[in-house]
Amino acid sequence: MTLTTQISYTGNVIEEADQTAMYFSGNPFILELKKLASVHINDGFAHSKDEEYKYTKPELFNSSLGSFGSSNDKKQAAIDNELLQTFDSKIHLLQFFNGRLDHQASRIETESNGVYIGSIHGVPAQIDIKRYLNCTAQANSDVYTHLNTAMFSDILVVYIPDGVTLENDIFISEHYESIEKISTAPRILFIAGVNSSARVIHHYTTSGDSKHSSVLVTEIFGDKNSKIDWLKIQEGKENSFAMDQTFAELKDGAHFSIHTFALSGTYCRNNLIIRLLGRDIEAHLNGLYLAGKNRLIDNHTLVDHIAPHSVSYELYKGIAGHNGTGIFNGKVFVRQAAQKTNAFQENKNLLLSDEAHMYAKPQLEIFADDVKCSHGATTGQLDEEALFYLQSRGIGFNEAREMLMHAYSAELINKVIQDPIKTYLTRKAEENFPD
């Protein structure tokens, strides 16, 4: 996207943003958020010269952007999700189709009094949306967060009151199928009250040959002693471009785990920003990314320790083959007040071909003196001795290679709680292992 094209496109986006405002004509708070976001869009999109996007080639994503309106908007989503069929128990199903929350295809089970799962347009008055929406995203935003804010037409809101353990898992199915080039801006707001607990599975899939781009923003708030387990599985087809931004704020005693499996897709950038606001918080960040032919997968994480006596564990593994590109950029901040912090970060990568690329940049910024922190990154190839050993036992080269990659990825897959999902991830990882 040239500068001239970008200026023209920005103008069109702002016009479309004005059209999305009609969905919130009676909500001055959201209208003001959209107005401010439109102003920021004028600053322009990211460029490879920007340090935060140095290896991400944002021009590829920018050129994928199209109209945020679609002739498919009124089409009801057909639920044909293989992962979804693995669940025997009841779940809360939230179905996004081409970026829009499909209320007819979604299904909400009965829960305790006070739980709300649904559109922002139906949020009960006692839930103070202003207290949460855009708060952490605005504080850590870049132009793509502003683009989402300007363009969303609905928000999936999950609110779990104090003391409630959600009986059923939440399954967010985000599917794209279009006969034309489209862009979408889904938005999720998740609020977990004091001593509450929930598990979320977010599954991103695409079908069809048309190019599409998704600019997703998820905001997660974990109050004191809350427990949140968040699983993100990304399975885009060719011509799928995803800019996925997740923001989490955690208070005293919260326990938060997020597992990201980027298995396929032409372009995927995951920005994950977690702020540990209180004491005795435990945060786990796990990720597996497979960068095969013509794929670029980027993981940018930031863990911000603001208060003392909290811990964070981070493990990301990548495999790049053919001409694929994998990126990991992980930052850990330990503020001066965050004494007694334990923060561990590890990134491991496998390169399977001379044309593949891996970029790793672990970072620690520590301003406290009584902490335990470590970080490291390694990049190498499959163990030749292990390959030779397996082949000497009559196992073919390709099968031996796959066995080693399976063992390499199993460490992360086994961190997932639900057994049916482990089975699914094992099979899908094997299908997408790079050449």
Image (cartoon, rainbow, N blue to C red):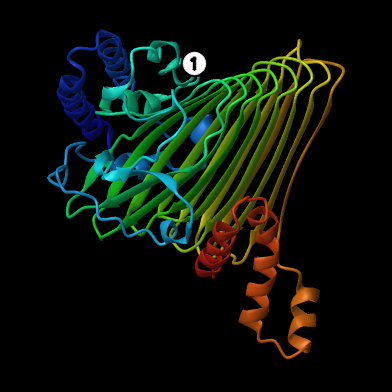
Question: Of 133 and 78, which appears nearest the observer?
Answer: 78
Name which residue type carries label 1. Ala
How many marks the image carries: the answer is: 1
Outermost right residue? 370
Q: Badge 1 is on which residue?
A: 139
Name which residue lies at 44% across and 31% down.
Answer: 218
Give the percent coordinates (x, y) of residue 293: 46, 64
Splitting the image into 4 quarters, where does residue 396 fall? bottom right
| Image location (x, y in percent) of residue 28 | 25, 8
201 vs 195, nearest the viewer: 195
The front one of 132 and 236 is 132
Examine the rendered structure and indicate whether residue 63 appears above or below residue 252: below
Along the viewing direction, whichever of 79 and 202 lies nearer the viewer: 79
Looking at the picture, does residue 339 appear above or below residue 359? above
Q: Residues within 10 Å of mark 1 (few under 14, many from 20)?
A: few
Quadrant of image for the C terminus: bottom right
Q: In this image, 84 relative to 329: left or right?
A: left
Q: Is residue 74 left or right of residue 221?
A: left
Q: Secondary structure at mark 1?
A: helix
Q: Quadrant of the N terminus?
A: top left
Residue in the picture at 67% in, 50% down: 415
Q: Is residue 151 left or right of residue 51?
A: left
Q: Position of residue 240 (x, y in %)?
A: 34, 52
* Residue drawn at (59%, 67%) of the image: 353
Q: Is residue 392 above or below residue 55?
A: below
Question: Which quarter of the figure has residue 68?
Answer: top left
Query: Residue 398 at x, y = what percent?
Result: 61, 80
* Residue 342 visible in the picture: yes
* Residue 56 appears in the picture as rendered: no
